[in-house]
Image (spheres, grey):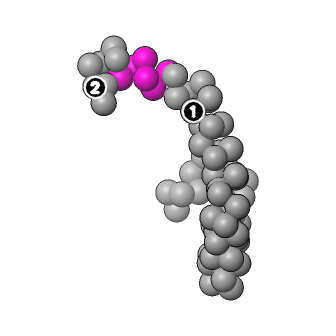
Amino acid sequence: MALLSGNPSIARFRFAEFRQIIREIRDGSFARDLLEEQRINYPRLRAMTEAARAHDLTGTEARLRQLLKLAV
């Protein structure tokens, strides 16, 4: 199976994460958590967004886009 090439333990971990996400969607806990997050003005989403902006890869991507003249 192509998805299991590379490190099989990482692939198993990812599949376990996906299964958990699907369970949360099916049992309604994902929707409840999302509505609670919305009610309190998305603090976790804001923190994740800020962490993504501060990540080294974000700056690298911007520099590459500039070098390749693909800036948006």
Residue 61 belongs to the span the image colors magenta: yes
Residue at the disc numbered 2: 70
Name the residue at 67% across, 66% down. 39
Name the residue at 65% across, 37% down. 51
What amino acid is at disc 2?
A: Leu
Q: Does residue 43 appear in this view?
A: yes
Residue count near mark 2 (Cα–Cα under 10 Å), binned few <14, some 14–19, many ≥20 = few
Q: Is the magenta stretch mostly helix, strand or loop?
A: helix
Name the residue at 57% across, 33% down. 53
Q: Does residue 19 appear in this view?
A: no
As drawn, which residue projects farthest toward the top?
67
Q: In the rendered structure, which disc, 1 or 2, sits on the residue that comes first in sequence?
A: 1
Residue 62 belongs to the span the image colors magenta: yes
| Quadrant into which the C terminus falls | top left
Residue count near mark 1 (Cα–Cα under 10 Å), binned few <14, some 14–19, many ≥20 = few
As drawn, which residue projects farthest toward the left?
69
- The answer to whether 32 is drawn above or below residue 48 in the figure is below
Q: What stretch is highlighted in magenta?
A: 60-65
Residue 66 appears left or right of 51: left
**Residue 18 location, x and y as percent?**
63, 67
**Residue 7 location, x and y as percent?**
66, 47
**Residue 46 location, x and y as percent?**
63, 47
What amino acid is at disc 1?
A: Arg
**Residue 33 location, x and y as percent?**
70, 70
Name the residue at 39% across, 20% down. 64
- The answer to whether 35 is drawn above or below residue 58 in the figure is below
In the picture, the disc for residue 53 is 1
